[in-house]
Image (cartoon, helix red, strand yellow):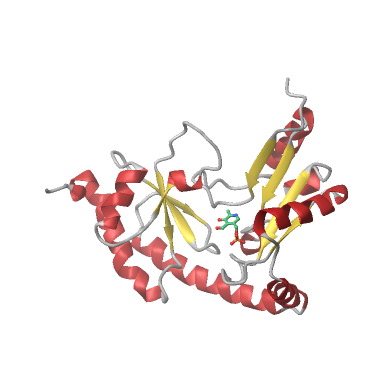
Amino acid sequence: MCTTTSKNLIHNARSSKPYACKPLKERRIAIAEIAHRYNVWIIEDAIYAPLVEDKIPPIAYFAPERTFHTGGLSKCFSAGIRSGWVACPPRFADRIANAHKMLTGGAAYWLTELASTLVLNGEANRVMELVKAENQKRHKIATAILAGCKFKSHPNTPYIWIKLPDPWHSGTFKNALAKHNIIVSGEDDFKPARTDQVFHGARIGLFSVASADELIEPLNIIKNLLESGIAGYDIRD
Ligand SMILES: Cc1ncc(COP(=O)(O)O)c(C=O)c1O
């Protein structure tokens, strides 16, 4: 049995990882209980939580004494406003501030001030609603074009996770699309720890083009490639 506190559990509160699973309250309670039993710290990465509006309490609610719940503005407001926060057991607040300073050199004062002003005066919430609406518009285009393919997604988030049919592997699929100048992320980019599990997934970002219409052509290429199988990726030297 593990009795040391030197272990951490990193939990991604929403579907940003290849598993793309839906959160369940029972599962969060179970994670909190296991962490308590093995005396493990929990880092709860909730960067997408404001977009997906989970009705389920975060793990921090079930294990407040050991959870570091993190969030930020870069996904729900703008990637240019890189400001985030950590809710932690109160006795760790100073340590968190120090660790952040040591690791990053400290946040720029004006950026932090801008971020907190935007949150406190409600502007961040207003813009977040616009972000959600644009995400939904792009998600609708993607799900229509990729109908018939297996994927997991949430309409408020700016990407979808495709389940690759046999015999595609994440890396081969990524390379095949690169030949069409389309960059997608393979599953390994998102695994937070070493694992021998393979998910055969690829993440397609819907926000790397300026307008929703620009998604149509690359998504059709992706659809064709999925349908034509590996034959669509013959290498000719
Ligand atoms: C799942 C997840 N958590 C946290 C972050 C960190 O966000 P940022 O550094 O943009 O505030 C990212 C950024 O890509 C992310 O994908």
Dividing the image into four quarters, tell me where ligand 1 lies: bottom right
The answer to which image quadrant residue 97 occupies is: bottom right
Nearer to us in this view, 22 or 6? 6
Q: Position of residue 118 (x, y in %)?
A: 71, 77
| Residue at image coords 35%, 73% | 214
Return the residue found at the far right: 91
Q: How many labels does the image show?
A: 0
- From the viewer's perspective, is 220 left or right of 20? left
| Residue at image coords 33%, 51% | 174
The answer to which image quadrant residue 65 occupies is: top right
Evaluate whether residue 55 shows in this view: no
Q: In this view, does 213 lie above or below 42?
A: below
Q: Split into 4 quadrants, where in the image is the N terminus?
A: top right
Evaluate whether residue 103 shows in this view: yes
Q: Where is residue 223 in the image (x, y as percent from the top left)?
A: 30, 57
| Residue at image coords 58%, 48% | 22
